[in-house]
Image (spheres, helix red, strand yellow):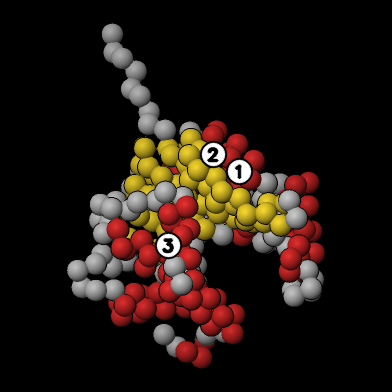
Amino acid sequence: MEKSKITKWHHAYIQNAYQELEQGYTKVQIDRLNINAKNSKVLDVGCGPGNMLTALSDDNPKLLIGVDTDKIFLQYAHDKNESILEHTTTHPNFIQGTLPTLPFQDETFDIVTCFLVMPHVPDDEIALTELTRVLKSGGTLAISGHGIGFPIRYLKRFKFKPLKMYLASFIYLLTGKKLIKNTLQNPRQICKILNQLGMKIKVQVNKRVFGCIATYWINATKREVIPKATQ
């Protein structure tokens, strides 16, 4: 990995991700959503520097794959996991890719995770459709994103960024197009789309700021298709 390409943003993001991992917060997120990856094929979409897959490796899954658009994150994730995981542990594989087109066949994975990616995808419904496509019948989809309350506490720190997020969300609401990335989602709408895609919501956890949802976490199961009886 060429260190000259690592920006201050990359450095801060990676440092924060692995700090949360070391402090046990990443494991808390997994437990909060009742995710058990034992003997499972797991895909983490938007894996970043690979901290979530590092935590999931403790369950001894069959397969761990991380997908991200950022080459720097992927290279760091590969190097970091090779250095900290024991030889007996399932080592993650990392692939460059992005929603809404994942390079996997239908119903490949038992568990698909996609945390804090929804604010950046071009279309919520198309992205969720692709995530459920690669998920096996009976499998678990765990996602998270930001609600309308997320920017409130950061109004001073990020200056115009919260206003940009509200503007992006307003444009998406009116036009159905994400002309500006980093939109805010309505968790009820996300759940509605998941239900339409044949998913059953099992767990939903909301973090609120001044009564408004700031961050949501959802665990949904893909309903098994019952074959029709032949006459």
Picture residue at 35% right of the left edge, 79% below the top: 79
| Residue at mark 1 to residue at mark 3: CA–CA distance | 24 Å
- Dot 1 amino acid type: Ile
| Residue 77 falls left or right of residue 219 | left
Q: Which one is nearer the viewer's eye here, 82 or 21? A: 21
Q: Are marks 2 and 1 in contact (CB under 8 Å)?
A: yes
| Residue at mark 2 to residue at mark 3: CA–CA distance | 25 Å
| Residue 103 falls left or right of residue 84 | right
| Residue 178 falls left or right of residue 1 | right
Residue denoted by label 1:
190
Q: Is residue 131 above or below residue 163?
A: above
Total numbered badges shown on the rendered structure: 3
Residue 106 location (% of width, % of height): 37, 44
Residue 8 location (% of width, % of height): 59, 85
| Residue 135 falls left or right of residue 6 | left
Picture residue at 36% right of the left edge, 61% below the top: 56
Question: What SS does tag 3 mark?
Answer: helix
Determine which quarter of the picture holds residue 119.
bottom right
Between tags 2 and 3, which lies in front? 3
- Dot 3 amino acid type: Lys
- Dot 2 amino acid type: Leu
Q: Is residue 219 above or below residue 8?
A: above
| Residue at mark 2 to residue at mark 1: CA–CA distance | 6 Å
Residue denoted by label 3:
27
Question: What SS does tag 2 mark?
Answer: helix
